[in-house]
Image (spheres, coloured by chain):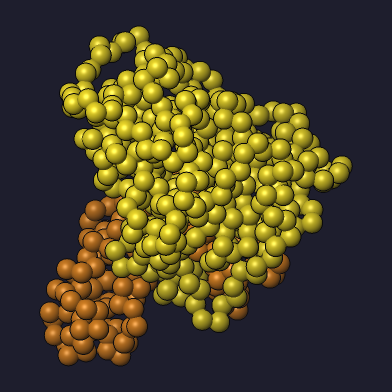
Chain colours: A orange, B yellow
């Protein structure tokens, strides 16, 4: 079913919207959750929470891209769930490695560093992603937005793993320079 | 700021980028448009971005010199004798180690056809049974370490390579920038190592990587590819029009560029070069040249028996081949216009293995489809020259 039609179902408060969402994007949402969460149960709950969140958000939202809308919800929920489960122990899987790779870019300060810094960070990240060429952007986002493994990215893009690693290394360096240049405290 | 803040903030990026990078979306120049209002890559600097990526371009160096045949004469291997489609299997030599080879097609090399002016196919030679050696070596590629950093050459060797190229490019005594991988990989035990020497002068950038790869990027408007070829002393330069397209179902947009083949002496085993001159798209106006010196960073594993030409042809008949360019179906033996045995040389391959390499002429409408009516279109097919049973994973699954 076309996305527009599914969104109409949400607006009509027709529960078929959930079924159609699940049919069309269930595996996509599941993949996002799975890259962040190691527990199958957490993953399943995250997927269901995504549907519920979408149900509660549409209306009033009328997303121009239902797929991206669902992806962002799923990613945020997965990060929330990951943080809760990670409070006690070190994380596992792709996200733990992605965190480790990004450690050089960040300091140890808490999330309470301030709204202004958060806004600046969003702006800098947006500019950084904007400035990447198409392939670099895909590699960067596959790793740090979707938390895919190096192997998955390489297979997805038909590239060698080494090339993906090298690209990520260079992109992290460039991001670090960009953050320093824009005065984002590391 | 902490790492989670970075990841949280990334959630706000454009939907277009989120969708474009979604799992399962392959490399596709057609869907790479920037969102409205975003700053595009400036033409003068676009090639700098491309230069970093050019390292993985496939380069193929031929090792078998064939009999010359009259230009553009289609000799059918096997002649008019009845075709026996039985592939004879020789007993395996169990003393030989299994060959590790994980294949990931490189961008632009998996999909596309080469289009030449009529009668100007560069490798216009045909392999015959007597050209095929009984054995050929397989090499272990030592050009990447476990962490994925290019390595293999000592700093001294890198400097020697750099100076030789820099001198030809007129860089004078320009000191190269040293690019160090210093543990930013997230691995605490990663030791700092030199991965690249880099210098730039007059819009020409030269990089020498620790894995024996040299990359030269230039703005075609300042320096013609032919000039670069001449400066570097390439013996032979043949230009084709190479078309590339996205394989996704929803779009099939094309990017045209010229490719120059056979620039290095083909007798210089395990060395090869590929030059791309981008004619439109984001990289328009760039010349990217990659030279891969595979010999410097590889070691011979062993000599392996080579399958016969006739068996290779039978494998083609059965569709057991690796496609090098947009040819999903073998068009038949009569379509073969040139053949040789080549090593696939790519820094990211685990092993360098010889392949039978067949150029096949594609139907006339193919050239038209690629916007080159009146020219000849060719595709390339590869059959492993080593019995596939010697591989850990059969290369034939690469298709």
Q: Position of residue B166 (x, y in %)?
A: 78, 41
The x and y percentages for residue A88 are 40, 53
Viewer-closest of A13 and B227: B227
Pinpoint residue B37: horizontal percent, then vertical percent: 55, 82
Q: Residue at x 77, y 45 (%)?
A: B169
Q: Decide if residue A112 is in sight here.
A: no
Check the image and name the residue furthest to the right. Answer: B173
In this view, the residue in front, B291 or B84, is B84
- Horizontal side, residue B92 vs residue B13: left or right: left
Looking at the image, is A21 positioned above or below residue A169? Answer: below
Say which of B186 and B2 sits in front: B186
Say above or below: B86 vs A31.
above
Q: Residue at x 36, y 15 (%)?
A: B305
The answer to whether residue B335 is above or below residue B138 is below
Quadrant for the N terminus of chain B in the image: bottom right
In which image quadrant can residue B78 be found?
top left
Q: Quadrant of residue B358?
A: top left
User: Which quadrant would the C terminus of chain B be assigned to in this image?
Assistant: top left
Rendering coords of residue A100 (x, y %) = 51, 50
Q: Nearer the viewer, residue B328 or B375?
A: B375
Q: Residue at x 32, y 87 (%)?
A: A61
Q: Which residue is located at x 60 percent, y 26 percent?
A: B268
In this figure, what is the number of numbered marks? 0
**Which image quarter: residue A28?**
bottom left
Q: Is residue B310 visible?
A: yes
Is B305 left or right of A50, judged from the image as shown? right
Give the left or right position of residue B305, taking residue A120 as reference. Answer: left
């Amino acid at each position: 079913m076309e996305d527009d039609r599914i969104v109409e179902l949400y607006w009509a408060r027709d529960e078929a919207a959930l079924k159609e969402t699940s049919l069309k994007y269930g595996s996509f949402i599941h993949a996002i959750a799975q890259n962040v969460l190691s527990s199958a149960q957490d993953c399943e709950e995250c997927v269901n929470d995504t549907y519920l969140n979408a149900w509660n958000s549409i209306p009033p939202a009328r997303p121009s891209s239902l797929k991206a809308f669902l992806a962002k919800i799923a990613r945020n929920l997965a990060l929330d769930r990951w943080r809760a489960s990670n409070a006690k122990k070190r994380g596992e899987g792709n996200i733990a490695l992605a965190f480790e790779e990004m450690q050089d870019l960040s300091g140890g300060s808490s999330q309470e560093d301030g709204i202004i810094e958060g806004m600046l960070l969003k702006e800098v990240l947006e500019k950084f992603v904007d400035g990447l060429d198409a392939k670099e952007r895909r590699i960067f986002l596959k790793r740090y937005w979707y938390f895919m493994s190096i192997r998955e990215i390489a297979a997805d893009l038909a590239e060698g793993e080494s090339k993906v690693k090298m690209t990520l290394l260079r992109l992290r360096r460039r991001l670090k320079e960009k953050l320093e240049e824009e005065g984002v405290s590391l | 700021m902490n790492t989670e803040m970075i990841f949280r903030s990334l959630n706000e990026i454009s939907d277009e980028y989120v969708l474009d990078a979604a799992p399962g979306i392959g490399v596709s120049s057609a869907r790479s448009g920037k969102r409205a209002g975003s700053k595009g890559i400036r033409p003068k600097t676009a090639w700098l971005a491309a230069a970093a990526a050019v390292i993985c371009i496939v380069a193929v160096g031929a090792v078998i010199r064939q009999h010359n045949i009259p230009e553009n004469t289609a000799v059918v291997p096997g002649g008019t004798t009845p075709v026996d489609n039985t592939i004879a299997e020789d007993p395996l030599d169990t003393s030989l180690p299994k060959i590790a080879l994980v294949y990931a097609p490189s961008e632009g090399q998996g999909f596309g056809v080469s289009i030449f002016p009529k009668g100007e196919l560069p490798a216009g030679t045909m392999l015959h049974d007597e050209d095929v050696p009984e054995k050929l070596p397989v090499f272990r590629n030592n050009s990447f370490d476990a962490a994925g950093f290019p390595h293999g050459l000592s700093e001294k060797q890198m400097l020697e390579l750099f100076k030789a190229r820099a001198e030809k490019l007129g860089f004078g005594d320009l000191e190269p920038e040293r690019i160090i991988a210093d543990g930013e990989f997230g691995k605490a035990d990663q030791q700092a190592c030199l991965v690249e020497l880099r210098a730039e002068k007059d819009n020409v950038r030269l990089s020498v990587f620790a894995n024996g790869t040299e990359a030269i990027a230039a703005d075609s408007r300042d320096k013609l590819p032919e000039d670069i070829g001449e400066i570097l002393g390439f013996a032979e330069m043949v230009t084709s029009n190479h078309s590339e397209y996205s394989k996704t179902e929803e779009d099939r947009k094309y990017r045209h560029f010229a490719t120059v083949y056979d620039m290095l002496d083909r007798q210089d085993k395990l060395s090869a070069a590929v030059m791309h001159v981008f004619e439109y798209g984001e990289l328009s106006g760039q010349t990217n040249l990659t030279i891969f010196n595979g010999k410097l960073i590889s070691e011979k594993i062993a000599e392996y028996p080579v399958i016969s030409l006739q068996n290779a042809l039978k494998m083609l008949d059965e569709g057991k081949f690796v496609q090098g360019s947009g040819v999903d179906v073998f068009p038949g033996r009569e379509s073969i216009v040139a053949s040789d045995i080549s090593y696939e040389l790519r820094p990211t391959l685990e092993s360098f293995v010889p392949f039978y390499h067949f150029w096949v002429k594609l139907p006339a409408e193919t050239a038209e489809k690629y916007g080159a009516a009146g020219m000849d279109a060719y595709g390339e097919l590869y059959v492993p020259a080593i019995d596939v049973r010697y591989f850990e994973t059969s290369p034939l699954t690469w298709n």
